[in-house]
């Protein structure tokens, strides 16, 4: 069977081998995206929240027994599923970013205790970074919103403002922020958010 070049490692979902994310990243990401992703993974390992393989091209890290983040690379169900790729995780690609979703990655931060560090986020000027990337419920997302009864999402007060349509169809039913192809500065902000979340879980 010929495996399309853009879909290496599709067999992860049927294999008992828990693939290391560092081995997979170079097959999808190039240039600065590859560097930033590898640097971020190294940071996670150094801080003892290493990424562990969970699903095809998906790795997760836990802290205090609960999920702290996910990192996802492009997914397909099989090499023959070229017309049904799983690109929902990459719907936040920046308008200025010419990188196609098959060459992208996304970091999902699970901010379960954000109410405990909202003030710190505001003091450090990160509230817009969070608000611009929170995961909203979207019609047509049959993997989550439509089939799991999520629509129209939930409302939550964030930084003194009502945020409507927060998706609750995510795994573990908690608030998440999705960051697609984050650059070096954006990764620094993500690291800070993860640190604050870990502190809030102690």
Image (tube, helix red, strand yellow):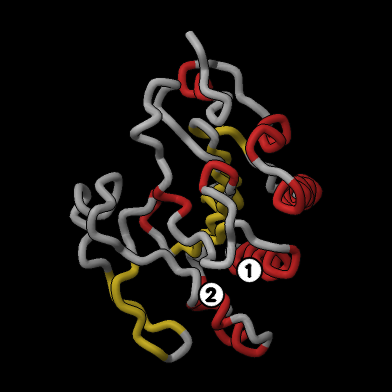
How far across and down, in percent of the image, does residue 174 sit? 40, 60
**Residue 59 shown left or right of residue 88 in the figure:** right
Query: Which image quadrant for residue 23?
Result: top right
- Of residue 37 and residue 33, the one placed in the foreground of this image is 33
**Residue 70 shown left or right of residue 191 in the figure:** left
* SS for callout 2: helix
As drawn, the label of residue 119 is none
Q: Are marks 2 and 1 in contact (CB under 8 Å)?
A: yes
Res 195 seen here: no
Label 2, label 1: how far apart the Cα atoms are: 9 Å
How far across and down, in percent of the image, does residue 113 sit? 50, 69
As drawn, the label of residue 193 is 1
How far across and down, in percent of the image, does residue 172 sit? 40, 51
As drawn, the label of residue 130 is 2
Residue at 53 percent of width and 56 percent of height: 108
Q: Is residue 115 above or below residue 39?
A: below
Residue at 53 percent of width and 38 percent of height: 58
**Residue 152 shown left or right of residue 123 in the figure:** left
* SS for callout 1: helix
Say which of marks 2 and 1 sits in front.
2
Circle 1 packing at 10 Å, graded few (<14), some (14-19), many (20+), is many
Counting residues from the N terminus, which is met first, the one under dot 2 or under dot 1? 2
- Of residue 126 and residue 61, the one placed in the foreground of this image is 126
- Of residue 26 and residue 62, the one placed in the foreground of this image is 26
Circle 2 packing at 10 Å, graded few (<14), some (14-19), many (20+), is many
């Amino acid at each position: 069977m010929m495996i399309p070049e853009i879909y290496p490692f599709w067999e992860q979902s049927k294999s008992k081998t828990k693939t290391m994310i560092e081995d997979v990243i170079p097959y999808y990401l190039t240039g600065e995206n590859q560097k930033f992703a590898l640097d971020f993974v190294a940071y996670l390992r150094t801080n003892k929240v290493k990424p562990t393989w969970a699903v095809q091209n998906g790795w997760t890290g836990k802290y205090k027994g609960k999920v702290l983040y996910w990192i996802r690379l492009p997914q397909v169900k099989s090499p023959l599923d070229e017309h049904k790729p799983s690109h929902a995780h990459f719907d936040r690609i920046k308008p200025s970013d010419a990188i196609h979703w098959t060459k992208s990655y996304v970091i999902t931060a699970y901010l379960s205790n954000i109410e405990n560090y909202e003030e710190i986020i505001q003091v450090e000027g990160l509230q817009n970074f969070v608000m611009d990337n929170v995961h909203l419920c979207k019609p047509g997302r049959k993997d989550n919103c439509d089939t799991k009864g999520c629509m129209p999402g939930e409302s939550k007060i964030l930084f003194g403002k009502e945020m409507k349509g927060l998706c609750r169809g995510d795994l573990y039913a908690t608030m998440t922020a999705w960051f697609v192809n984050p650059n070096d500065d954006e990764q620094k902000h993500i690291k800070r958010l993860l640190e604050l979340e870990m502190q809030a879980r102690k």
